[in-house]
Amino acid sequence: MRKIFIIILIFYTHSFAQERIFYSADKFQGTETPEGPIKEYIGNVKLIQGDVTITCDYAKLFETTNISNLSGNVKLTQKDLTMKTLRATYFGNKKFTKTDTELEIQDKKTYLKAKSGDYNSLTNIANFYENVFIEDDSVIVNSNYLQYNKKTQESYAYNNVLIKGKFNSSYLLSDTLIYKPKEKYSISYGSPILFQIDSLENEDEFIYDTLSISSDTMQAYRYIDNEHYVFTDSVEIIRKDVKARAKLATYYRTKDIFILEDEPIIWYENSQLYGDSITIELENSKLKRIESVGNAFSISKEFETFAQFLNQLAGHTIEMIFEDGKIARIITNQNAQSLYFSQNDNGAIDAHKHDCKRIEMFFENDEIDKINFLENVNAEAIPYQDIKSGVKQFYLPRYKWSKNIPLGKNLQYKSNYFEL
């Protein structure tokens, strides 16, 4: 079997190496040199090798090596692909074209441009170097290096990568990108950051609201009816009114929903929210709902001057409901517990603890207006004298407080084609 394989390989290699190149031009001249014969083709030059056709103004063929130097309006075509550049070198034995000048490739709906590059007509793989630009019917990609596979239409981009959605204001920055348009899928490595910029109309002006999501790895699924992104490890979400961390997050862009899992935590104004999983739902770019499910715990600062007097909620679920972007209700369900502090007119502070099945908190202008404790209620009032001796002893069992708040990210990118 191995001998048969070797014979087939030798036959294939020999057959391809013997694939002839046909030349035509307005003018032809040849010379003999110590390195072998050289032929020059001048004016309306055309090279044809199998399914590859190249036209240019001038071609210099080194017959011994079957290498041609091409210059002036160089154009290579292979089926649906067209490559244009000012000058190039064509390696006839390999059906390989290389150029150190700016080149363009048009392949069906995909357009590519770079400062230099090469294309292998046998493997259908192109490499692009410096200021690489690629555009198809859904995204634009910019990078310092990119490899493009004509057969699969897949792209592998590296170093200073930007991918921009053509039909939305989303930008993704990363070190490495693998893009598979036929599958409407891409994956990014090297601390990718997704930015989405929305504009909110406020009276007579537009306010720009930027969302940023960063992680170690990001996968994008660009389906028309279900565009979503999966972020893995060290996930940080930053929006003007919400910040979050998790080890796993999914952003359903078409639905404006985030699902955070694996140690998620959310910061909202002066509050923190924990749980096994947390869902953030937006509507018209405004907060609509935040829900923590499984070991849900909420904590908020009530008094700036009394840092340890922290209001707390615990339950199986905690749901925060917003109206017009402002907090309207907080509902805690199943084994609901609360600890909250109040201050009387004399400045004295006491605490109140409750255990019940359900707690409903209603807000007016971001202030608590009413609280309902429902079913199997147990209540305890804790006077200031007891609190003074050590308030932490009254904290709820799952108390936690994190100072590791994500820092804001800036959308910055610069190339020959973009400056953000």
Image (cartoon, rainbow, N blue to C red):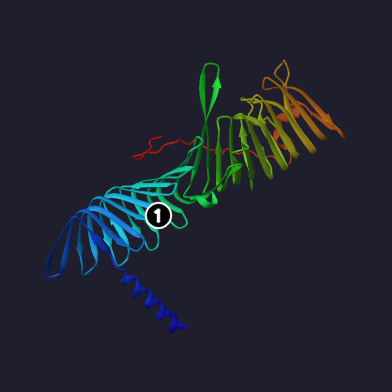
Occupied quadrant, residue 310: top right
Q: Residue furthest right?
A: 376
Element assignment for label 1: strand
Q: Position of residue 227 (x, y in %)?
A: 58, 43
Front-most of 319 and 378? 319
Residue at the (72%, 16%) spot, across then down: 346
Q: Is residue 134 visible?
A: yes
Q: Amino acid under label 1?
A: Gln
Front-most of 102 and 172? 102
Q: Is residue 142 left or right of residue 195?
A: left
Q: Position of residue 42 (x, y in %)?
A: 18, 55
Residue at the (46%, 53%) spot, across then down: 153
> How many residues crowd mark 1 within 10 Å: few (<14), some (14–19), many (20+)?
many
Occupied quadrant, residue 17: bottom left
Label 1: which residue? 147
Q: Is residue 390 visible?
A: no
Residue at the (28%, 49%) spot, across then down: 85
Front-most of 122 and 417? 122
Q: Is residue 76 left or right of residue 60?
A: right
Query: Is 27 rendered above or below residue 160?
Result: below
Q: Position of residue 390 (x, y in %)?
A: 70, 34
